[in-house]
Image (tube, grey):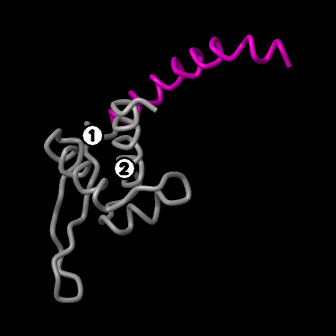
Amino acid sequence: MDVQMKRGLLDVCVLAAIQSEDSYGYQIIKDMKPYVEISESTLYPILRRLEEGRLLTVRSVEHNGRLRKYYHITDQGLGRIEEFRNDWKEILSIYQFITREEANND
């Protein structure tokens, strides 16, 4: 898969993981695991990039004597998910076009 495409997909996956409630890194990884494997070394740069892009915000909360960062999706982040849903329709249409000969040959 194209690196840029995968990067964009992972960004949207992370946003989707925190869409319904604020979450922290380890929980995001656990929530995504049934669908996509993501490591901490991949996740945290994504979170920083999304924060810099104002697609999410961060707040620190003390938990068991340590600070835990909680991530919250912004309106811009929700807009990015909606944008992805619209883009996905076009991608599916392209996929159907590309694979139509295979379907006809079966």
Secondary structure of the residue carrying tag 2 is helix
* Residue 101 on the magenta span: yes
Q: Where are the magenta residues, as a range?
A: 79-106
Instruction: Look at the image and tell me in which quarter the C terminus lies.
Output: top right
Q: Which residue is mark 2?
A: 14
How would you rate the neighbour count of disc 1 (Cα within 10 Å): few for under 14, some for 14-19, many for 20 or more? few
Q: CA distance from mark 1 to mark 2?
A: 15 Å
How would you rate the neighbour count of disc 2 (Cα within 10 Å): few for under 14, some for 14-19, many for 20 or more? many
Secondary structure of the residue carrying tag 1 is helix
Q: Residue at x 59, y 16 (%)?
A: 93
How far across and down, in percent of the image, does residue 78 sit? Answer: 34, 39
Q: Main secondary structure of the magenta part?
A: helix
Q: Which residue is mark 1?
A: 75
Q: Residue at x 24, y 64 (%)?
A: 70
Q: Nearer the viewer, residue 66 or 39?
A: 39
In this view, 29 is above or below 48: below
Type of residue at label 1? Answer: Asp
Q: In the visual, does 28 lie left or right of 94? A: left
Q: In the visual, does 90 lie left or right of 70? A: right
How far across and down, in percent of the image, does residue 51 sit? Answer: 18, 47
How far across and down, in percent of the image, does residue 86 sit? Answer: 46, 23
How far across and down, in percent of the image, does residue 92 sit? Answer: 58, 22
Q: Residue at x 65, y 17 (%)?
A: 96
In this view, 91 is above or below 41: above
Residue 29 found in image quarter: bottom left
| N-terminal-most mark, 1 or 2 | 2
* Residue 51 on the magenta span: no
Q: Residue at x 26, y 48 (%)?
A: 46
Type of residue at label 2? Answer: Val
Q: In the visual, does 105 lie left or right of 90? A: right
